[in-house]
Image: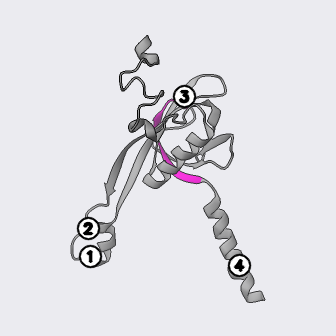
Amino acid sequence: MRFLTLPTLTILAGGLLAAADSATVTYIDGNVADLTPNSGATLYMNNPQTMELKTPLHKVQIPYAQISKAELGSVMVHTADPEPLYKVWALPKRLAKSETRQMTLAFTDANGQGQTMTIEMSKASADGVLATIERHSAKVANASWWGDNYWKTTRNRDTWGGAGTVAQK
């Protein structure tokens, strides 16, 4: 019985860490007063009302309802510094390339001022963060339907020549 307790607790603790919605990011640019450019941070998305960007010195809470724009940048591939060929133990380092992606967020802070921030994170984390933001923020959620690319609908009336809202103006 005692022998099963330690592995069970280890698996449970690992599961709790994996379930926590967090991503390691780098704050690249923006007009948030507390953050300095190119500083490392952790983005927590555990709360359904706000996401939180924590650096060692500061903490910025961003309510999902206040986010007006979230868009992803292009994928950037980072390669490690080249090692000499005789260092065979560095072969995995030569073959592995890390891919990151930048995300630009526009939101209003507690004082009602417009804020922007650009953060960089791994490619897999960026897709998950954008999906979480779209799920919690009605302003960012894309109202398009996949069928608009194939059929004439009332939503895509402007693209096929119908009298849509843009065409009427």
Position of residue 32 in the picture relative to residue 87 (left or right):
right
Q: Secondary structure at mark 4?
A: helix
- Which amino acid type corresponds to the residue marked 4 in the rendered image? Thr
Position of residue 80 in the picture relative to residue 50 (left or right):
left
Residue extending farthest to the top is 169
Report which residue position mark 1 lands on.
Answer: 87
Report which residue position mark 2 lands on.
Answer: 83
Quarter of the image for the C terminus: give it: top left
Q: Nearer the viewer, mark 1 or mark 3?
A: 3
Instruction: Please name the residue shown 56% across and 40% down the image.
Output: 134
Mark sitting earlier along the chain (1/3): 1
Please provide percent x and percent y for residue 167: 40, 15
Q: Secondary structure at mark 2?
A: loop
Nearer to the camera, 166 or 65: 166
Q: Are marks 4 and 3 in contact (CB under 8 Å)?
A: no
Q: Is 17 inside the magenta-drawn segment?
A: no
Q: Nearer the viewer, mark 4 or mark 3?
A: 4
Please provide percent x and percent y for residue 78: 33, 55
- The stretch in magenta equals 22-32
3D distance between C-alphas at marks 2 and 4? 42 Å
* Label 3 crowd (10 A; few <14 / some 14-19 / many >=20): some
Instruction: Please name the residue shown 63% across and 42% down the image.
Output: 51
Report which residue position mark 3 lands on.
Answer: 115
Q: Nearer the viewer, mark 3 or mark 2?
A: 3
Quarter of the image for the N terminus: give it: bottom right
Does residue 105 sit above or below 46 in this rendering?
above
- Which amino acid type corresponds to the residue marked 3 in the rendered image? Gln
Instruction: Please name the residue shown 64% across and 60% down the image.
Output: 19
Q: Are marks 2 and 4 in contact (CB under 8 Å)?
A: no
| Dot label at residue 8 | 4
- Which amino acid type corresponds to the residue marked 1 in the rendered image? Lys
